[in-house]
Amino acid sequence: MKDAVIDIRDLAALMPMHLMLDRAGVMVSRGRTLAKLLRGAVRLEDVFIPADNLGHRISFKDLFSHLGCGRRIFLQMRHHGDVSLRGHGVHVSPERVMLNLGFGICLSSAVQRFGLNDSDFPPSDLAMEFLFLHEANRAALLELSRVNIGLEEARKSAQVLSITDPLTGLLNRRGFDIAFSRAFDQRDKRPFALVHLDLDHFKNINDEFGHAAGDRVLVGVASALASEVRSGDRVCRAGGDEFLALIFADWPAADSLNICKRIIGRIGSVEAGPGSGRISASIGIAVSDSKPAVLPHQLFELADAALYRAKISGRGRVAL
């Protein structure tokens, strides 16, 4: 029986990733997929850098002699560093060799760079199926990451809302208690003053001008407090018309007295409505090195006592 002769066009379709080379490295035949990569190149070494299985560069002469010995060959593309091919080859004659190649882990890069699709691979090649699975897995991971980021942002937002007064944007009592607990534990290293502020005759404002006017006053007072304290201080609306603050300073008594006097002056410019008159506030201060305050609640008691003294001594003033 005569030997069958395979047309070179059939070979290109049957083995789209093949290369036939002569001893000089000229590409005699190439598969249709490799043709997309090689374009008009004539010699193997014009496009590829041959390497051994350890990644060491070798000459085409060495590559030619190694074929058929069971060794894998590696070809790094000269002008596309993220794409390399691997495979094996055999001698089809003393002067010609046939290489059958694949992209391996560079498949994704090659598909994107050269616009390859399923028709560029033989039906028996599962490369595209693996690529589809890889892309599906990547898409799933990206979606999972997006969901996790959304959940984390929602958690952080809920955490902020849980310690924030919705009317004024200041800390609520829960948030302030957390800040106070930390401050009290570190009072020896970072002294502070606990400020307790209460508006004078606030009930009259609500009764005469309505609760909407009362809310405007509370927002104005919150703004006055926030504008006078420093960035490291903490301010809280404890509830109703009561506000708390932590003022950190090396000399908390003197600094907090000066700050609170400015706060009272600024609150005096807040209006509930036309003809409402001046708004005033009374403030009590207790400092973190107060001898009787060996427990957190005792410092609050001292601040409350100072606030009471400010009230009974005429309101609109500060007591330490």
Image: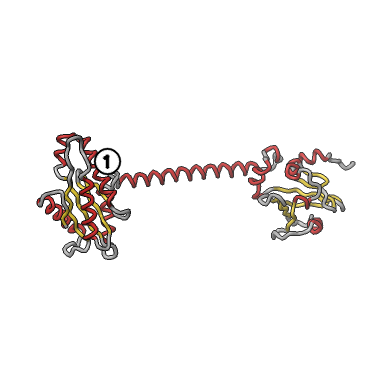
Amino acid under disc 1: Leu
Judge whether residue 319 can be spotted in this image. yes
Depth check: 314 or 199 in front? Answer: 314
Residue at left offset 22%, top offset 35%: 212
228 or 177, which lies in front?
228
The answer to whether residue 15 of the structure is visible from this angle is no
Q: In the figure, is residue 35 to the left or right of 166?
A: right
Q: Looking at the rendering, which quadrant does residue 167 occupy?
A: top left
Residue 254 drawn at (x, y percent): 22, 60
* Classed neighbour count for the residue bearing mark 1: other residues with Cα under 10 Å, few (<14), some (14–19), many (≥20): few
What quarter of the picture does the C terminus occupy?
bottom left
Q: Residue furthest left?
A: 312
Q: Which residue is depicted at the point 45% across and 43% down?
A: 147
Q: Nearer the viewer, residue 244 or 106?
A: 244
Q: Is residue 255 left or right of residue 46?
A: left
Taking depth in this image into account, of 1 and 166 the one nearest to the observer is: 166
Q: Position of residue 264 (x, y in %)?
A: 20, 49
Position of residue 164 measured from the top left corner of the image (x, y, whole percent)? 29, 45
- Disc tally is 1
Q: Residue 283, relative to residue 208: is it above or below?
A: below
Task: Indicate the secondary structure of the residue bearing disc 1.
Answer: loop
Name the residue that disc number 1 marks: 167
